[in-house]
Image (tube, helix red, strand yellow):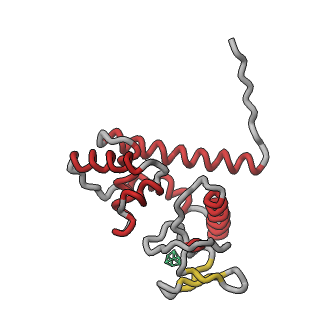
């Protein structure tokens, strides 16, 4: 029988990666629970959530295919199945995410700022390296103007200053920029 060896990365970097994996596992579990409840595939649930939360111009087959890294045919089939099921998206996603939201809410203001800032940098890197294909955050938005001191940006659409904690990571008004700016 083949032997397997497991290595535990106890560096700070390794523990951050492991922590992010555990959080993503929590999302997968919640998604799976919802899938079973309504006899849907995880992709069907993700698409329902997306359609429910995004604005009209993003509710297109090509946009959805890019968003979920699948072919247009897969999106068409999935949407067709949802239509056949006469599905209505119920307003209960927020309840499910509370289990993840609550401990984050208990973090100190400084910790929240650091976590958010670090996650934004990670997401930008994942986008640049092609792991995440769609970003709807301020730093990739044509309405975003970074400031000279790099501490505060400005949204020309909402006419509002945006420091690190006010930067949006999934904005409905987002308009894609050719070259993302840095936070
Ligand atoms: S429109 Fe949204 S994403 Fe774009 S800069 Fe304003 S707040 Fe940020």
Which residue is rendered at x = 64% and y = 82% of the image? 146
Answer yes or no: is residue 12 visible: yes
Front residue (pair 133, 21): 133
| Quadrant where the C terminus is found in the figure | bottom right
Which residue is rendered at x = 41% and y = 58% of the image? 62
Which residue is rendered at x = 74% and y = 25% of the image? 5
Q: Is residue 56 left or right of residue 83?
A: right
Front residue (pair 106, 176): 176
| 104 w.r.t. 26: above or below | below
Q: Quadrant of residue 105?
A: bottom right
Front residue (pair 142, 7): 142
Pick out the residue farthest to the top: 1
Residue 99 % position (x, y): 47, 52
- How many numbered markers are drawn? 0
Answer yes or no: is residue 108 visible: no
Pick out the residue farthest to the right: 11
Q: Is residue 183 left or right of residue 133?
A: right
| 118 w.r.t. 18: above or below | below
| 82 w.r.t. 176: above or below | above
Which residue is rendered at x = 54% and y = 83% of the image? 155
| Quadrant where the N terminus is found in the figure | top right
Residue 56 % position (x, y): 34, 68
Residue 157 % position (x, y): 48, 84
């Amino acid at each position: 029988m083949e032997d397997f060896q497991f290595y535990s990365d106890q560096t700070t970097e390794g523990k951050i990666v492991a922590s992010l994996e555990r959080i993503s596992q929590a999302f997968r579990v919640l998604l799976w629970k919802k899938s079973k409840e309504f006899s849907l595939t995880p992709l069907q649930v993700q698409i329902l959530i997306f359609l429910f939360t995004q604005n009209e111009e993003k509710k297109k087959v090509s946009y959805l295919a890019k968003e979920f890294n699948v072919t247009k045919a897969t999106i068409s089939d999935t949407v067709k199945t949802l239509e056949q099921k006469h599905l209505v998206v119920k307003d209960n996603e927020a309840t499910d995410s509370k289990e993840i939201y609550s401990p984050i809410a208990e973090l100190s203001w400084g910790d929240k700022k650091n976590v958010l800032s670090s996650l934004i940098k990670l997401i930008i890197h994942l986008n640049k390296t092609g792991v995440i294909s769609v970003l709807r955050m301020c730093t990739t938005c044509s309405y975003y103007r970074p400031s000279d001191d790099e501490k505060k940006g400005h949204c020309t659409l909402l006419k509002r200053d945006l420091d690190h904690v006010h930067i949006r990571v999934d904005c409905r008004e987002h308009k894609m920029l050719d070259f993302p700016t840095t936070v």
